[in-house]
């Protein structure tokens, strides 16, 4: 990884938005990995950059019980990419980065907390040709392996690609054929049982997971992301297509969020990826607490996998340059099945029915996005 020579090229004014760029490029390599890490609403701080990754070179699946915190080997110890500006170094670094979606199963295991046996696997991709959009000055920087002229190639294909068609207008009244897990009766019973266990001193709050499932049909997963980002107030979003894998077929992860678990930019010191995520996961906003008592109650009450919910999505480049976003509003598409993950936030003396209604409301944007993508 450290031996790959990286070329970069700056374009003073980005010719397309990050979403348009992803749409124009992804049709060139069906079945191969690519990704979009987007600042939906750039603020000049944490949300300054958007990244498009294309022609990913390799990928792997990390079993649920494996330590994905150690999967990156000596990546953080490797030298940062060289460059004359922060964005150039960032682009060169991300072109050699690991990009992935990571479940919280192993961090819970480290805390000696039992987790469902069917917990989802983490997924990782490594190495790509990338476009980094600097929302502060409107520029775009391409980076990729110097061998093969991949930077000129991505710029050529970006220019000659086709812009995705307009989406149908979204409608909150559109019929959505989702099946919920657990179903309504079981969810209410589970929430009522859990609410009875809450205690002002030891257990004031818990978050129970739930999912919605639906066949994807002929819908393009990227259209779901495009529709979702138009409806959300979240400042960040991600669309990661892991491509075709021998074990699971096509795998996509997409979502929106506002909680940065870890960020380290070129030339700026900070905690390591392992330290930052080890301290952040499981995240209290997805479990209610990091206290072992609460996590043990969750493990006893729930009987389905949390999959990606409560884990992390992001990248780590040589030198430890990294960004990780909490996977709190996320969807996985595996082998044609769409699974939206969410949670029910239960608090002391709160009505479980109200908590379930609030969960439904938080999920509405993603569910409507699927209906919109279906046209």
Image: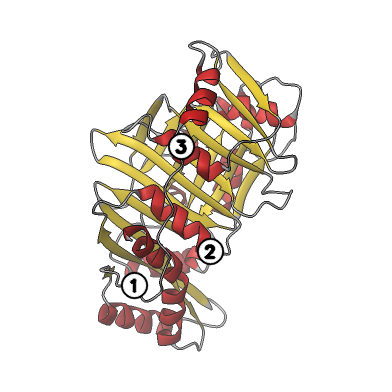
Q: Nearer the viewer, residue 298 or 81?
A: 81
Q: Is residue 71 above or below residue 291?
A: above
- Quarter holding the C terminus is bottom left
Which numbered tag is attached to residue 315? Answer: none
Which residue is found at the position 38% from the left and 66% from the top?
367
Number of numbered discs: 3
Q: Which residue is mark 2?
A: 232
Q: Is residue 166 above or below residue 139?
A: below
Q: Is residue 307 above or below residue 153?
A: below
Q: Residues within 10 Å of mark 3 (few under 14, many from 20)?
A: some
Q: CA distance from mark 3 to mark 1?
A: 28 Å
Q: Which residue is mark 3?
A: 24
Assign a secondary structure to mark 1. Answer: loop
Which residue is found at the position 57% from the left and 80% from the top?
201
Front: mark 2 or 3: 3
Give the image location of residue 262, x and y in percent: 62, 46
Looking at the image, can residue 309 be seen?
no
Q: Which residue is mark 1?
A: 174
Q: Quadrant of residue 269?
A: top right
């Amino acid at each position: 990884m450290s031996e790959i020579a990286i070329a970069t090229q700056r374009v003073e004014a980005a010719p397309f938005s990050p979403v348009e760029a992803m749409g124009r490029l992804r049709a060139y390599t069906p079945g191969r990995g690519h990704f979009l890490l987007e600042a939906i609403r750039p603020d000049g701080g944490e949300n300054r950059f958007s990244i498009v990754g294309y022609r990913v070179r390799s990928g792997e699946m990390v079993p649920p019980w494996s330590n994905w915190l150690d999967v990156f080997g000596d990546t953080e110890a490797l030298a940062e990419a060289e460059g004359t500006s922060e964005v150039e170094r960032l682009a060169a670094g991300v072109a050699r980065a690991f990009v992935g979606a990571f479940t919280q199963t192993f961090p819970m295991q480290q805390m000696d907390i039992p987790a469902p046996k069917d917990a989802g696997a983490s997924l990782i991709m490594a190495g790509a040709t990338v476009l980094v959009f600097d929302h502060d000055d409107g520029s775009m920087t391409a980076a990729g392996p110097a061998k093969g002229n991949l930077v000129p190639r991505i710029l050529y294909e970006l220019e000659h690609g086709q812009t995705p068609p307009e989406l149908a207008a979204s409608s909150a009244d559109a019929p959505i054929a989702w099946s919920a897990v657990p179903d309504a009766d079981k969810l209410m019973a589970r929430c009522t049982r859990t609410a009875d266990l809450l205690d002002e001193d030891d257990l004031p709050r818990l978050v129970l997971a739930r999912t919605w499932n639906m066949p994807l049909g002929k819908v393009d997963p990227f259209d779901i992301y495009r529709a979702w980002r138009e409806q959300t107030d979240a400042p960040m979003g991600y669309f990661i297509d892991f491509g075709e894998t021998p074990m699971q077929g096509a795998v996509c992860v997409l979502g929106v969020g506002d909680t940065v678990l870890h960020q380290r930019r070129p030339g700026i010191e900070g905690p390591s990826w392992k330290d930052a995520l080890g301290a952040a996961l499981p995240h209290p906003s997805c479990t209610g607490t990091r206290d072992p008592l609460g996590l043990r109650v969750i493990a006893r009450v729930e009987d389905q996998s949390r999959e990606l919910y409560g884990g992390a999505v992001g990248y780590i480049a040589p030198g430890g340059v990294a960004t990780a976003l909490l996977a709190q509003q996320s969807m996985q598409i595996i082998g044609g099945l769409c699974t939206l993950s969410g949670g029910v936030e239960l608090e002391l003396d709160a009505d479980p029915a109200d908590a379930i209604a609030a969960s439904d409301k938080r999920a509405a944007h993603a569910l409507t996005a699927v209906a919109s993508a279906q046209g």
